[in-house]
């Protein structure tokens, strides 16, 4: 478990490489904060059944939203 006891923030988490990364790092022991700007797609990710994954809707072009996502990651 390469990521045991670590928190990983994945942006673009609802699709493609981001979605795959969420599953991989969670399987390696990480607590994952999955960030994407699409609420419906994040809901699908949340329902995928990864117990160590928290989803956060945020647009990474907006500094305040990024700060909120990081705040949830360190909480």
Image (tube, helix red, strand yellow):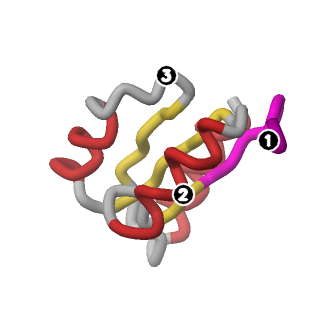
Q: Quadrant of the N terminus?
A: top right
Q: Is residue 4 magenta?
A: yes
Q: Name the residue: 45% across, 54% down.
A: 35
Q: Name the residue: 33% across, 57% down.
A: 14
- Tell me the residue that label 3 is attached to: 51
Viewer-nearest residue: 27 or 13: 27
- Tell me the residue that label 2 is attached to: 21
Q: CA distance from mark 1 to mark 2?
A: 12 Å
Q: Name the residue: 22% across, 50% down.
A: 39
What range of the chain is rendered magenta? 1-9
Q: Which numbered disc flags the more N-terminal residue, 3 or 2?
A: 2
Secondary structure under the numbered disc 2 in the rendered image: helix
Viewer-nearest residue: 64 or 70: 70
Q: Is residue 55 magenta?
A: no
Determine crowd level at label 3: few under 14, some 14-19, many 20+ residues with C-alpha closer than 10 A: few
Determine crowd level at label 2: few under 14, some 14-19, many 20+ residues with C-alpha closer than 10 A: some
Secondary structure under the numbered disc 1 in the rendered image: loop
Q: Which numbered disc flags the more N-terminal residue, 3 or 1?
A: 1
- Tell me the residue that label 1 is attached to: 3
In this picture, is 66 found above or below 51? below
In this picture, is 38 found above or below 25? below
Q: CA distance from mark 3 to mark 2?
A: 15 Å
Q: Name the residue: 23% across, 39% down.
A: 43
Expressed as whole percent of the image width and height from the top left, the position of residue 21 reads 54, 57
Describe residue 48's horizontal placement relative to residue 32 as left or right. Answer: left
Expressed as whole percent of the image width and height from the top left, the position of residue 70 reads 64, 49
Determine crowd level at label 1: few under 14, some 14-19, many 20+ residues with C-alpha closer than 10 A: some
């Amino acid at each position: 478990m390469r990521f045991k006891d670590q928190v990983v923030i994945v942006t673009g988490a609802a699709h493609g490489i981001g979605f795959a990364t969420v599953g991989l790092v969670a399987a390696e022991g990480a607590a994952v904060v999955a960030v994407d700007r699409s609420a419906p797609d994040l809901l699908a990710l949340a329902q995928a059944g990864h117990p160590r994954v928290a989803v956060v809707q945020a647009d990474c072009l907006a500094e305040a939203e990024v700060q909120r996502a990081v705040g949830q990651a360190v909480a």
